[in-house]
Structures are given as C-alpha cells and as structure tokens.
Image (spheres, grey):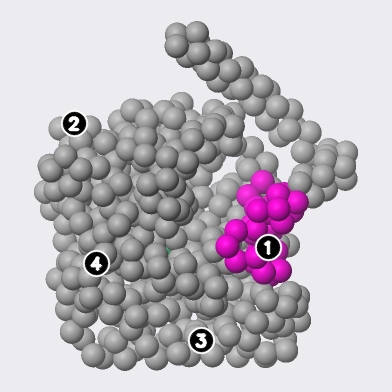
Amino acid sequence: MYNEIMKHEEKVKFNNYVVSHLLKIAFSASKTVFFKNVIFPMVEKGIRNAIERLPGPVALPGVIDDKFYMARAMVYSGLRVGSSSRFANTIVNKAILSDLRARKEIIFREKFGFDPPGFMVISPAKRCNLRCHGCYANSASEKDQLDYDVFTRAIKEMRDYWGARFTVISGGEPMMYRWNDKGVMDIYREHPDSLFLMYTNGTMINDKVAHEMYDLGNITPAISVEGLEELTEQRRGKGVFEKIVKAMKLLKKHHVTYGISITATRYNAEEIISDRFIDFYFGELGAAYAWVFHYMPIGRDVDPDLIPTPDQRVYLWEKSWDIVRDRKIMYVDFWNHGPVSDGCISAGRPGGYFYLDWQANVYPCVFFPYAAANMKEIYDRDGNLNDLINLPLHSCIRNWQFRYWKEGDLLRPCPIRDHYKMAKKFVIQTKARPGDDAAGEILQDTDYEKKMTEYDEELRKKTTDIWEDVYKKGIERRTAVKIHQTTRR
Ligand code: SF4
C-alpha cells in the first residue's frame, strides 16, 4: 500500500513537472508561425475528433459544431491570457489526467443507474458590501451564512462520491463570508485538489488577495460587470467601475486567470456583445472568459419586463457565436448555449449540479428557487450528498431532461424560464419549499405566470425553425438567420 501511495505521489510530481514545462513551451511557441500553421490545426482536429467520437446524448450536426467551437475557444482563451502553470496544473492533473472521476462513476452508476453530477454551486454568504439595484443581498444579515462544516464537507463528499472536483462559489459577495474567523480563502486552501470558480463583485480583491489566489493556483474569479462604465455604475454604484478595473489589473499582474460575469437585461443586451465591450475586457484588460446570465425574475422586486425580449435572446445567440467562433473567445451564454451542455444541467443530472445556499437549503439550480432538502438536516441525521439524488423534485426534473434530449429544442433548455408552467407543476406536485417569501408569492401570482408563459410561447416561435435548420439539418448559422429574417430590436 505504502509503495502504491509513493508511486502515485511520484507520478503526480512528475506530471506537475512535465505539465508546467510543456505549458511554458506552449505559451511561448503559440505566438510562432509554426504553431499557428501546424500545431493549432492538429489540436483543432483532435478536439473535433474527440467530440465526434463522444457526441453526448444529442448527436446532431449543429450541436457537435457548437461543442467544437466552444472547446476550441476555451483552448485559445487559455493560451491568449497565458494561465499560470500552477492554475494549469490544477486543471490538467486534477481534471484531465486523474482517473478519480472514472472510478467513482462506476460505483455511482451501479447504485443510481446513471453518471454522477459534476459539480455544485455554493453560496456561503447572502450579504454583500455593495448595494446594487434589485439585489437580494441588500437585506442580508450576518446570520445568513453557511455553517463552515457543511461547506467543507459538501466539497469533500463531491470528490468522494462523485469524483467531482469543481465548485462554483457564488453569493452575495463570497469574500464577505466569515465563520469563526474562517473565510472562502480557507476553503480554497483546505481543498488544494479542487478547482473553484468564484463569482465576485471584485471590490475586495487587493494586491495581497490577488497574490494569494496565484499562490493557491486553484481559484479563478469571475467579476460582475453590467456593460462598460456607465451601465456598470448605473446598477452597482458610483466608483465601482474603477475598483473593478483595478482588481482586473491586479489579477493580470499576478497571472491569475479571471473572467467576467454579466447579467443580460433588456437594457444592456446590445452593449455586452459589442466590439467595444469585447475589446475592452478581453483585449485591454486580459479577461479569459465570460459567463452571461439573462436576468431571471426571482428574488426581491421581480420584474419579468427586464428579461431580454425573445428577439434580443435570438440576437444574443447569433452574436455570441460570432465572438466564440470568429474571435475564439470563451464567451458562454448560459441559456442560449444550451446545445453545448446538452441542455439543462440542474437537479444533479449526469455532469450537472445542485445549488447549496447560505441556509444549507439545496435547490435544483441557482435560478430555481424551490428547495427539495436542507443539507444540514441531512447531515444531522447521518445522511450524505447522495441523499439528494432521488428526491422527488430532482427525479422529476431529471426525467424531463432525459425526455427533452429526444424531443426538445436545446435553444429553450430551461424548465423554470422557458417552460414555466411545467416547472410550476413540478414544484407543486413535489411540495418543494420556496427559498424565500418572494418565491412563495410568485406561485400565486397569475400576472407573473401570464408574462412568463407569453414569453415562453413567443420564444418557441422564434427558435423552432433555427433549431430545425441550424441544429438538425446543419445549415450554416448566418444563412439560416437570414432566411428566417429575425426581427431585431
Ligand atoms: S434550470 Fe434553467 S438555469 Fe438552471 S441549469 Fe437548468 S436550464 Fe440552466
């Protein structure tokens, strides 16, 4: 046994050594003509072959194309920003070269009949140091924080039961989390073999924090922006933009791979895909990736009218692919890029996730505000993370996802947003608990339901032909859009 462990450690050390040296060579060589003309085409061919060999549950020509272009953009984005060898080591050794996931999949599959979830999103603190318009964190108190033992145990169990070593940390502002003098950086330090993506407003990232992130090598912050300076300050407050830009410069100085996160609304939909926006954050400031989340009318002061209109949604779909395909930037539009993830990833589906909040409530998804269980209560009765898998709400959503792979349109992947009536039925049938008063109230709100279902119907009309032509028949995206003459706002 001892010998086996030693062999394993030597192997890890050797891998670390090889990967960091290969990366150094790759980063400098990637600027050469030889790399561009010879190596890149080979890498691209390799990515394409791998996706075609394992296309996933929805093996349509347009879906394979989307997966290829996104994977390619991910590689180019990594090379463009020159991720630190520590960070790249965490990804390569812990995710790509490790056989942990494969081993755990066998055990999980035997028990549940499908592959395990791939990650969790955890919001350890509701509170925040900013007061953005419409954000629930405004009303949070110090009590709204996740018990540290639950926090760290969930991350450990993900690895032990699912072979999953990726955690998304969200908020409130995660950097505000304190539990008996421990904060999120302690979590990152305690789990060196996991990778963390942290959504943050960026204002608490100073030189020391940026250096610590580099040193840990297992954390990538995604800083929230609403657009360029004017739109960001309109929502986040005066002076915030300058602090954000400063944080980005510090992260770049310390070679921390970072990205941006954007809430798309009816009012910023055009700006966030403009050349000016992309040039500024990716060209000038060195962001590696973007996550776009369309405004979701949940929480306090819900306003369905803020959702990008169905026309804007199609426009964002079309333009986001220009950014991914032509500029090779990892720009992920969470809803519009449903084909990349084979649709909805909620409710612990294979490779998908659960959401754990500051009260230890567990939801199918960050945007699905109805909880099926509480993790602290599960631990108090000697349960574990696997107890979440077959809870009625989760099984109900998963069965729908599996059916949807066969008959659905992955440009409308979201049960709660794009199929609201059905999601509401699941919530009522399974007696899921509203996460807050607002989530309870909207279940009774007929006006809300009317707006959501009207949106769903209008979106269906806009995407059905695109799904048929671009994804099923493989017609080129721009040609198909021209044919359908998408009306733009
Ligand atoms: S429920 Fe909607 S937002 Fe959540 S993972 Fe599924 S598609 Fe995405």
Between disc 3 and disc 1, whose residue precedes? 1
Gap between marks 4 and 3, in whole Å? 25 Å
Look at the image and tell me in which quarter the N terminus lies: top left
Rounded to the nearest angstrom, the CA distance separating label 2 from label 3 is 50 Å
Question: Which quadrant is home to the C terminus?
Answer: bottom right
Mark in front: 1 vs 2: 1
Q: What amino acid does circle 3 point to?
A: Arg
Disc 2 crowd rating (10 Å Cα; few below 14, some 14-19, many 20+) is few
Residue 4 percent coordinates (x, y): 50, 13
Decide which of tag 1 and tag 2 comes sooner along the chain: 1
Callout 4 amino acid: Tyr
Asked if residue 60 lies left or right of residue 197, the reply is right
Which of the pair 411/238 is nearer the observer?
A: 411
- Whether the residues at callouts 2 and 3 have beta carbons within 8 Å, the answer is no
Q: Give the secondary structure at mark 3.
A: helix
On the image, numbered disc 2 is attached to which residue?
181
Tell me the kind of residue under disc 2.
Asp
**481 in magenta:** no
Q: Residue at x 30, y 47 (%)?
A: 386
**SS of the residue at dot 2?**
loop
Residue linked to disc 1: 64
- Labels 2 and 4: the sequence-earlier one: 2
Residue 395, above or below 440: above
The Cα atoms of the two marked residues, 1 and 2, are separated by: 47 Å
- Callout 3: 10 Å neighbours few (<14), some, many (20+)? some
Which amino acid lies under the numbered mark 1 shown in the image of this protein? Answer: Ile
Q: Which dot marks residue 370?
A: 4
Magenta span of residues? 47-75
